[in-house]
Amino acid sequence: MSASRPFLRTYAAVAVLAGLGAYIYLVESKKEPGSEKKKEKVFSFDKAKVVGLALRPREGEPIRLVKDQSKGWRMVAPSDVAADASEADAIVTALESLEVDDVVDEAGANLAQFGLDKPRVTVEAAPQGGAPLTLMLGDKVPAGSGLYAKVPSKPRVFTVAGYLEGTFTKKPFDLRDRDVLHVKRDDVRSLEVKGPEGEYTLVRDGAEWSFKKPLATQAGRWAVDGILGALEGLRMESVAAEEPKDLKPFGLDPPKRSVTLQLTSGVHRTLELGGSPAEKKSYARDAAGGPVAVVASGLVDDLSRGMDALRAKRLAEVAAYEVEGFDAVVDGVKRVYSKTTAKGKDDSETQSWKRTAPDAKDLETDKVQDALFKLGGVEVQAFIDAPGPDTTYGLDKPVLKLAVRKPSASSSLTVELGRKDGVFYARRSGDAAILKLDTAKAEELLKALKEL
């Protein structure tokens, strides 16, 4: 009898759980779709019509923003500067979507216990032609994830989502426009860099970049894009001087470095960069005027590597998908290769490769793509910027001539490979430098092309 008791207790527990589950299922199945109580919106307004914002913190300076339909958001207090539109819009959006989580005190008789007698921050939005909308935020809910809140027009105290604390509790610097240059990388047509590492000029041709000065040579597309990204994303970490009268303390008279950008609009923008070794800070300023900003050292670190860091360190920057065809002269024989793209019934694309000269032959796509991959993988070991005669590098009798065709004629590429005393050298079209190549990878490329 005693041996059966554990089994009976287990059976009883299972039966109770089964019954509870059936009850829950029955209750839930009787609920009408959408019968869950919707949360109450705190405000009802059109966020597109908001033309003013004010933040009055318990501690710190009050902040006021105004919106001009043509010029966007601007901070007018505590200082008159351009505002960060994304931050201002985030506050307006948060107010528009604000919901009451729970009502904790209908009468609101003792606001001090919620931190609402002196709110942590009071947020005010001014819709055009309408009455201002005001939200008061108090303390955090103990052991919870919410904030106590109320509106002046009603006595009740309610809670809102705790994550909104970061949206509404801002300092003036958080809401000012912190972009230093206001440029988009795709709008840059050329850039001129001056600094202790030397001077050089880069120009864009389609998606490709090349140096114009001090010599005509190819630049690495992704390396230059990294510099452009740093310029586009350069933001103030703090303001060292709002209206500087003396730039020398910041290493900006004269600037230690400068970057001049020519944009598609024809406008030129110049960024001046300085520094203080004692403070280990990097300073930046738009040459046209404005504050001196403290910025992250990333851009300065990139520029300090000089021109060599931006050079194309591979024989060719190619991807198989962007190559339409290529011609290769190997062992004195010219071979022509072309790619065909066909669409299936489901609009999927299939690609095939064919050799069209000196004879016609269908090729294995994987082998062609492997050869193109090897072309992009040949590394440059050294740049010879003042080359001697072609005979010095075996380029008087090239072992390979390769012309790569891309959709854009400006991005097409021609290279020649020479071999001298077992060392491979190369010359790219439009490039004044001779390249010393990785021998093993150059051999692999030659082998792959001979097998096509």
Image (cartoon, grey):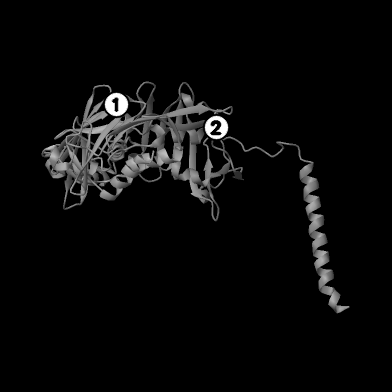
Q: At 81% across and 46% down in the image, what residue appears? A: 26
In this image, 276 relative to 172: left or right? left
Residue lying furthest right in this view?
A: 1
Helix, strand or loop at mark 1: helix
Please say if 308 is above or below 3: above
| The one of 230 and 241 positioned closer to us in this rendering | 230
Q: Quadrant of residue 396?
A: top left
User: Which quadrant, please, contains the N terminus?
Assistant: bottom right
In this image, 446 relative to 246: left or right? right
Q: Position of residue 46 (x, y in %)?
A: 51, 26
Q: Type of residue at label 1?
A: Ser
| The one of 446 and 325 positioned closer to us in this rendering | 446
Note whether residue 444 is visible.
yes
Numbered mark located on residue 410 in the image: 1
Q: Residues within 10 Å of mark 2 (few under 14, many from 20)?
A: some
User: Which quadrant, please, contains the C terminus?
Assistant: top left
| The one of 195 and 75 positioned closer to us in this rendering | 195
Helix, strand or loop at mark 2: loop
Numbered mark located on residue 43 in the image: 2
In this image, 324 relative to 223: left or right? right
Q: Quadrant of residue 321?
A: top left
Q: Quadrant of residue 260?
A: top left
Please say if 22 is above or below 370: below
| The one of 388 and 316 positioned closer to us in this rendering | 388
State the separation of the CA atoms marked 1 and 2: 56 Å
Note whether residue 181 is visible.
no
